[in-house]
Amino acid sequence: MTVPKPSLELVRNVTDEHILRALMRHRRMTRAELAVETGLSKPTAGESVRRLVAAGLVADSGERTAGGRGRGRVGSYYTLAGGDRTAWAISIAPGGVVAEAVDVYGETAGRAEEDAGRTASSDQVATALRAVAERLAAASGPAELAVVSAADPVDRATGRLVHLPDAPFLVGDLDPAEVLAPYVAGEVTVDNDVNWAARAELAARPGSDTFAYLYLGEGLGCAIVSDGRVLRGRHGLAGEIAHLTTAGPGGGATPLIEVFGLLGLRRPGSTAIDVDRLLAAATGTGPRAAGVRAALGEAVRGALTAITSLADPDHIIVGGPWGQDPAILTALRDAAARHPRGPVLCPATVPAPSFAGVRADALTRLRDGVIAAPR
């Protein structure tokens, strides 16, 4: 059987992509440097640069190498045309809205923050999001695209935030894409914070592509990663574990989110878990702390059992401010060991994982857009 040869156009596109990605990594390079960096021959690299200059994707920077007098020919430095284009990475969380403008080189071109308050309504959060967008646009210009992490469930079809019963944060609906439309030229991608955290852990763990990410903080959440993909469910609500039935402090069947109310570990007037109070109650050496840890382990075991039984992960990564506490993680491991299939629990490793996830995705999408630009 004769294997068909790739078309000349395909070869040129692949070559051009190598050149563009090299310039994304190094900002400016000569044709000779590009040939060495990409492994292409000098004529092939030079022809690709010529095509990309003609297409308006690469430009002669005007800078020259120090040639002459025995130092070889003078070379021109090339750079990306329009390298100042940016993508926005945005986090909407209980503490407020945080956003960065990221350029194609992976550097931060602008940053803005706005406090919205833990009990903010959707209108108040929208106001904070709009203020952040205005400051970023003033600092770095409109964005090519935006990627948003939200500490709430996100409707897969619309990108709107969904308010579920007992959700501790945003009240009502919020449509980030609608708020950002005047400031973003292209697509606005929205997903919940736990899914973004799972993607960040996926990138940090080569060879580990089937796991669950369990978030234990002021809110509760879970992400399922299967064969390298986050499973979102039909409506985008996969992993919403707050209402899983588990064992309460007295052993009775109780929704997971209600356990923290029964233990007196909620913030006043809210379903949000009081992390400071929980850590103070569960991390001492006395019998009361041991009892709280045991109650937490038994309650979370219901979620671990459901995740293991239904998703069959290789392991479960535990993140969040109280989930990673060593004493509590040990209690969770002891509880998990009583499951017939004993899921392996691992502490999360990526700092600020949700924001790391959106920032990495924003950069990837921005660079892919440059590569896909018409020649």
Image (tube, grey):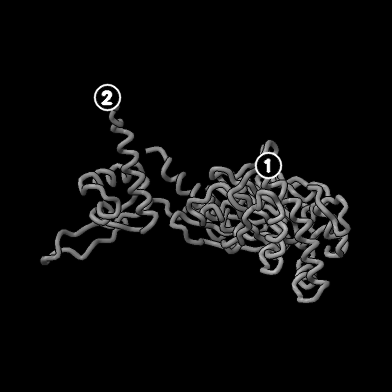
Eye-nearest disc, 1 or 2: 1
Give 22 or 313, whichever is nearer the viewer.
313
At numbered mark 1, what does the secondary structure look like: helix, strand or loop? helix
What residue sits 23% from the left and 62% below the top?
65
Residue 26 showing in the rendered view: yes
Residue 333 at x, y percent in the picture: 68, 60
Depth order, front residue of 295/52: 295
User: Does residue 149 appear in this view?
Assistant: no
The residue identified by callout 1 is 310
> Measured from the top left, where is residue 326 in percent x and y?
66, 68
Question: In the image, 139: left or right of 117?
Answer: left
Q: Please identify the quarter of the rendering in which residue 117 is found.
A: bottom right
- Residue at x 78%, y 73% (from the top left corner): 280
Q: Considering the image in quadrants, where does the C terminus appear?
A: top left
Kindly report the distance in space between the C-alpha atoms of the residues bearing marks 1 and 2: 45 Å
Q: Report the number of discs.
A: 2
Locate residue 290, reporting x and y percent: 78, 70
Q: Amino acid at mark 2?
A: Thr
Circle 2: element type: loop
Instruction: Categorize mark 2 by other alpha carbons within 10 Å: few (<14), some (14-19), many (20+).
Output: few
Rendered view: 120 above or below 227: below
Q: Which mark is residue 2?
A: 2
Residue sitting farthest toward the left:
70
From the viewer's perspective, is 31 left or right of 287? Answer: left
In the rendered structure, which disc, 1 or 2, sits on the residue that comes first in sequence? 2
* Residue 289 in which image quadrant: bottom right
The numbered disc on residue 140 is none
Toward the bottom, the furthest residue is 285
Residue type (three-letter) at the residue carrying disc 1: Leu
- Mark 1 burial class by Cα count in 10 Å: few <14, some 14-19, many 20+: few
Is residue 367 rendered to the left or right of residue 221? Answer: left
